[in-house]
Amino acid sequence: MKKVLVLGVGAQGSAAAKRLDLEENVSEIIVADRDPEAVNTLAKSLKKAKGVTIDASDLNSIVKAAEGVDLIVNGLPLEWTKNVLDAALTVKSNYQDYAATVSLHEDWVESIRIQYDVYGPKFEAINRLAIIGTGSAPGLMCVATRDAMRYLDTCDTIYNIVWEGVLTKRFLPFWWSPVTALHDMSEMAYAVIDGKLVRTEAFELPIKRKYDYLDEEITFVEHCHDEPIHYSFNAEKFFKGLKNAYFKYAGPGIDFAKPLYKAGLLSHEKEKVKDVMVAPFDVVYNHLPPAPKFKEEIKEIIDEGLLSDSGCMVIEAYGKKDGKDILVETHVNAPGLVESYEMAGISAEMYLTGQGGFLFSKMFLNDQFDQVGVISSDMLTMEQVDIYFNYAKELKITLDTKIKKL
């Protein structure tokens, strides 16, 4: 029986905690956040949970909550990742998070390198595993990208493609942490081009796709995301000599943020406006609604009527098999907003990210990781990829893979 600490009770953490509550080999779930009302509301809805209020800026506060746990699931804002990693080392726990951080270094790539190269040996020394980037993207998408490698002898180019196609009648550009989403929108993107990790201009390098299940052709653009960074570190060992990798994105969030970015309104640099120094980013963020996470709120949004309840998550992997050029096109199938609500009382974003993350937690609980140190979600063995998607089928998350000759 395992004891799990879930840090952060937002859209991702609360969805993961609800799934953990159903696992037979979980003895106790500690749900922790700075918001006592949110903590108590979630804890009361679960059978195995107790709520704890923490201050994530205080390492000792996290350590106290984590004493005796087998796994820490970190769903806190990214600036607290260092404290949570250090707490996991202190209590000798396994660790899992949803996305990369700049809490270890101001440069995002260097921060990820530090997780691998500095924290990796530290977790090895206590015989524990820290697995990073385990939500939907990164996470589920990275495992699906690994799955595509089984069909290739060599890989030249990977496109990770996401369309957030849920559009509501109310103003709601983001279904997950608005501050994280807007930070991503405010940055130049990363891509691997000719074997080198480079910066690309946000919202540029468009590609157009019209998949069978989409009603229209969608334009996808460059977006700052974790996947190309991880693939650049792991190109030889896990991605068949990968030379190029891109993350392409579309949806209401892109439509909202692109003109703001072009106008300089996502800048973090303070400027004087009528004798007041203010960062444009902070003003925009201040006007964003929080991500819906409560059942009644999600139902209200659905009842108002949806303009669209669609989307896609696609991996296009180009390479060679038996000397021939092929495309491995993998589509991730998962419940939309209405179906996610009907199944679990949560949003599609909470479902895909929370459940995608939960599947890694379930593998921890069932002792299906033999690695120690630090790995990212794109570094699973093929056997672990199979285990992951066998679990995913139970949650109606499946892969549809098409092999196309070029």
Image (cartoon, rainbow, N blue to C red):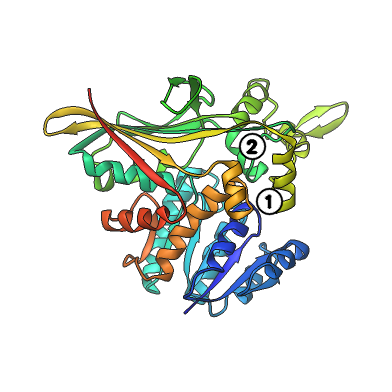
- Image position, residue 113 (x, y; %): 42, 50
Is residue 7 or residue 170 the one in the foreground? 170
Marks 1 and 2 sit apart, C-alpha to C-alpha, by 18 Å
The amino acid type of the residue labelled 2 equals Leu
| Residue 179 figure quarter | top right
* In the displayed structure image, the side of residue 199 where residue 74 appears, left or right: right
> In the image, what residue occupies the spot 68% across and 69% down?
43
| Res. 322 image quadrant | top left
Quarter of the image where the C terminus is located: top left
Q: How would you rate the neighbour count of disc 2 (Cα within 10 Å): few for under 14, some for 14-19, many for 20 or more?
A: many
Q: Which residue is drawn at 47% across and 54% down?
A: 395
Please report whichever mark, 1 or 2, sits nearer to the chain's N-terminal start: 2
Q: Tell me the SS state at disc 1.
A: loop
Is any part of residue 186 visible from this angle? no
Q: Position of residue 208 (x, y in %)?
A: 44, 19
- Residue 229 visible at all: yes
Which of pointers 1 and 2 indicates the residue nearer the eye? Answer: 1
Q: Of 223 and 359, which appears nearest the observer?
A: 359
**x, y percent for residue 171:** 74, 32
Q: What element carries label 2?
A: helix
Q: Establish if 394 lies above or below 169.
A: below
Residue 182, numbered circle: 2
Q: Mark 1 points at which residue?
A: 293
